[in-house]
Amino acid sequence: MGLESIVILGPTCSWKSAVGARLAHLLSGEVISFDSMQVYRGLPIGTAQPSVEELSLAPHHLVSCLDISEPWNVNLFVPEATRLIDEIVSRGHRPVLVGGTGLYARALVYGFSLMPSDAAIAESLRVESATPEGCEKLRDELRAVGEIPRDISLNPRHLARAVEVFRLTGKAPWTLQKKQDAPKAGFRQFVILPDFPQLKERIRLRTAKMLEAGWVEECREALGRGLAQAPTAWQALGYRDIATALEAGMPGGMAALQEVLANRTIQYARRQISWFKHQHPGAVFIPVEDFQGDVPQRILEIIRKELAL
């Protein structure tokens, strides 16, 4: 089969990190993360970075390697991931790509032309998109070229990026890409699809554990290092909610914050599942109905069978 890259996709909280680390260990491989936020140092709890045990099973790349002040986007990810894949293969190892950032996976696996960018425009738009009023102005600008896709309209970072491309090209970014329905050669994709009602409860339990592990203090320290001014890291799920709660004096206490964070994560997981079902033709889908026992090992056995290992 050669040294194909194995891609493990799925919504947040779906055992991806554990499965990826175990598979890389089995294959003498190396893990490349395509999670857009796990790349940042100092945010291990809130971005659910791989555990110490998982990191010990195989080399990991694009995890905890950037300062929160540095930008990270699909334009930066694709060439870096491509370089890493080439290096890993040259060592005779198997690349195992793991994550839930659908756009990154889609761009790498199916390929599309990267959009133009301009640092000065991007910074101006980042500042403007930091407020609801600013986001609405950006939506007004994009409405001139048609209906705005929901995932762009509701995400300040994606909205700002869309306006940046529009200003540079005169066209909406979603009109510039031709959708490719066949993955490029050299990739095998697996999508973990947990039963959603059970996944919601799993997310609620994990959110509680993340708060117990010190997520609030992690956010407080990151704010002190400039998180709220960061071009990309400030978009990491949950940190704005924690910052808002801290500024307001934690109304409702930790229980109220936990509910907000869990619900935010559940909404995100729902969007991820929809994306992977519709944007990754050719992938092997792995439904998970039984959440008891060693779920990562059961998923791993399915992947092993598909790969004839």
Image (spheres, grey):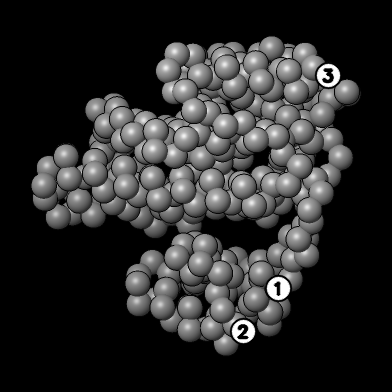
Q: Which mark is residue 175?
A: 1
- Residue flagged by tag 3: what amino acid is it? Gly
- Residue flagged by tag 2: what amino acid is it? Val
Q: Position of residue 117 (x, y in %)?
A: 66, 66
Residue placed most toward the observer, 291 or 65: 291
User: How far, Cα to Cα, is label 3 from label 2?
Assistant: 48 Å
| Marks 2 and 1 close (CB-CB < 8 Å) | yes
Residue placed most toward the observer, 154 or 92: 154
Q: Position of residue 102 (x, y in %)?
A: 60, 48
Q: Position of residue 97 (x, y in %)?
A: 67, 33
Mark 2 neighbour density, 10 Å: few (under 14) some (14–19) many (20 or more): few
Is residue 35 visible in the rendered image? The answer is no
Residue drawn where x is 55% and y is 51% of the image: 274
Q: Which mark is residue 92?
A: 3
Give whichever of discs 3 and 2 has the lower sequence position.
Answer: 3
Q: Where, by quadrant of the figure, is residue 257 drawn? A: top left
